[in-house]
Image (cartoon, coloured by chain):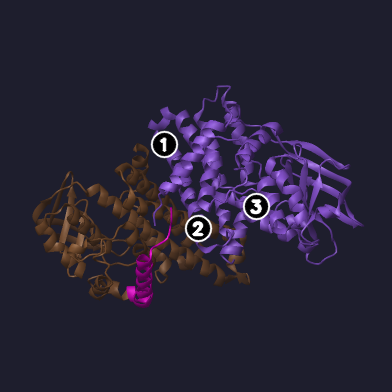
Chain colours: A brown, B purple
Amino acid sequence: MNFDYNEEQQLLADSVRRYLQKDYDFEARKKILAAPAGWSEKVWATFAEMGLTGLPLSPDHGGFGGGAVDLMSVMEAFGEALVVEPYLPTVLASLVISRSGDEKQKQAILPPVAEGKMRLALATGERGVIGAPMADQVVLVRGSEVLIGKPVILKSYRTVDDLSAADIRLEKAERLNATAIEEVLDFGAALSCAEAVGAMKFACDTTLEYLKTRKQFGVPIGAFQALQHRMVDMFIAHEQAKSMACLACSKVDSSENAADRARAVSAAKIKIADSARHISQESVQLHGGMGMSEELKVSHTFRRLTVLLRRFGDIDHHLARFASL
Amino acid sequence: MDLNYSPEELGFRDEVRSWLAANLPAELKDKGHLSRDELLRWHRILAKKGWVAPAWPKEWGGTGWNLVQRYIFEEELGFAGCPPLMPFGLSMCAPVLLAFGTEAQKKRFLPRIYNGDDFWCQGYSEPGSGSDLASLKTRALRKENHYVVNGQKIWTSYAHYADWIFCLVRTDPTVEKRQEGISFLLMDMKTPGVTVRPLILMDGGHAVNEVFFDDVQVPAENLVHKEGKGWTVAKYLLGYERMNTGRIGESKRELRKLKELAKSRMSDIRWRDRLTRVEVELMALEITNLRFLDRMRRTGQPPGADVSMLKIKGTEIQQALTELAMQAADPAAQETQALERRYLDMRKTTIYAGSNEIQRNIIAKMTLGL
């Protein structure tokens, strides 16, 4: 039993965090979103240089053989910075290919992904596929079959949390072996939990800062006990959520059976859906009118959390799955 | 990061589990409203095994277990349905004596606490001093080689069983900073002038009392730490007290019993979701508790103020479980009364040991800097 990151994980977490603080602050992000593409090739190239795009892939394909725990700190940092580049969609689709593709498919796709030259998306239906507009290939799960192909964009749009999505169909689709899908979706759910934890951390930190600086009635509003206790409850919700993200990522990497893994992931999704809703709503409420404003990052964090908690299965789905295991 | 127990830790858990299965008397298992003899009987069984005070230094009988082993042990005690180990001697008075007591005090009291020779209780709250404990008024006036104590304590758990009480008393009512006029005093409950009056709570049970002190003469050697340093001692102790309030083992046991009791209701989605949410809360609490232990292990730092959250969440879960158990039972059945009484009784958990509102104040101030 230990909660430590190893040295490599810690170094990676630190360098990702440093990079995002320096080059991906709220203003930089705004500029990226103001451009028609809605994402930055330069940022993507940096992700590749840092080894992020190849992180979960095997060394045979230019990767580092990382697991969910290795990606956890990256996703936490992405959540804090509200990254809009399609990192998780690419990671998840590349995992499906590396686990279920044939050697030809792997060689054609995975090394370019690791090098940052190719982006992917994972679709569980043909509508609202996140990352599809900039994806070279899309892995589509349709019922019991899994297909891979080039996406034809039928309609593209931005999600409420500023991600690029599209309704698609696949061109020249090839079939993939579907056995690893549940596992990859749990991997994605666990990492979306880590992303939410990062976003919640920002929401808590910035709200606490606001309580200490915003003055009314001649004192910082954080002097009022009614607000102090609400801030404490946000803090607790974040700590609990963080614990569950650790559990989910750790079990995704180490579980010997699928039920054990699925149980941990569903439990994390349930807890984090509650925490994310609680923290996002309170962070806006405690900011007062300013919390509603687009000018503050906290309102963008609200948007990310609101949508994120329903991705990879909403709370009702996971309540049902948890109870069935 | 690996959140699975190591093979060694699992081996330790199995050793504890099988020993408890073989040594916990059936008539004590899951028993509520325990008598003094029943509580001490279990205490002495563990003392004989050498397991009654794992956290103490080895020279005084501690086991030398690491933090994770101690956590596993406590969880197994709860999970097996053991009678509670009364904390007042083992994990309140003893740590204070170890940290602040004289050598003579340690030698006099620690072995008797360990062996279950003395039953201790805690004299903190007063009628006018609950959350605002530092306003306490029970007066201890120094006269030559003893103190004369007058005043009243309230909510004193198991005072009616106790041989000894440790008290916060006011030795100096004149100092400007009222905390500096408080001292930590040990009193023999058999001393003339000590009177115990039962307070029956809404579940009908007798666990707490009022304790009156009327010209009670206490030898000066029973003062712990220096005069006026009682508040320092109390604050040290609060950290200890909160480490035990997650009650995760007990809650796991209650959850398992509840699942058994309400098996047929799992097809009702409303019930299923309510139960699942509490189960998930308990998982989150367990992992958070382990995460704090892991941090203590790595940094060597004592628990920070944010362990208050273990108390807040742990007690909320305990209460939620008793509420669900009551709801799951047939309201017309006489046996349901026991569940209803347990629900009534457990309302105390969010009030005692520093109410959950006080815990939030502590986090706001110490952790968040508000």
Task: Measuring from the top left, give residue B260's x and y in whole percent.
Answer: 45, 30
User: Is label 1 in a helix, a strand or a loop?
Assistant: helix
Three-letter amino acid code at the position of disc 2: Met
Which residue is labeled 2 in the image? A234
Crowd tier of the residue under label 2, counting other residues whose Cα lies within 10 Å: few below 14, some 14–19, many 20 or above: many
Q: Label 1 is found on which chain of the structure?
A: B
Main SS category, magenta section: helix
Q: Is residue A278 above or below residue B202?
A: below
Foreground mark, 1 or 3? Answer: 3
In this figure, which residue is indicated by the disc labeled 1? B272
Crowding around mark 3 (Cα neighbors within 10 Å: few <14, some 14 to 19, many 20+) is: few
Question: Of helix, strand and loop, which one carries label 2?
Answer: helix
Rendered location of residue B110, percent (x, y): 71, 48
Residue A214 visible to the viewer: no
- Image quadrant where residue A119 sits: bottom left
Label 3: which residue?
B59
Q: Are marks 2 and 3 in contact (CB under 8 Å)?
A: no
Co-location on one chain, circles 1 and 3: yes
A59 with respect to B313 (left or right): left
The three-letter amino acid code for the residue at tag 3 is Glu
Nearer-N-terminus badge (1/3): 3
- Residues tagged by mark 2 and mark 3 found on one chain of the structure: no
Residues rendered magenta in the picture: A1-29
Give the Cα distance between marks 2 and 3: 43 Å
Picture quadrant where residue B230 is located:
bottom right
Q: Is residue B351 above or below residue B231?
A: above
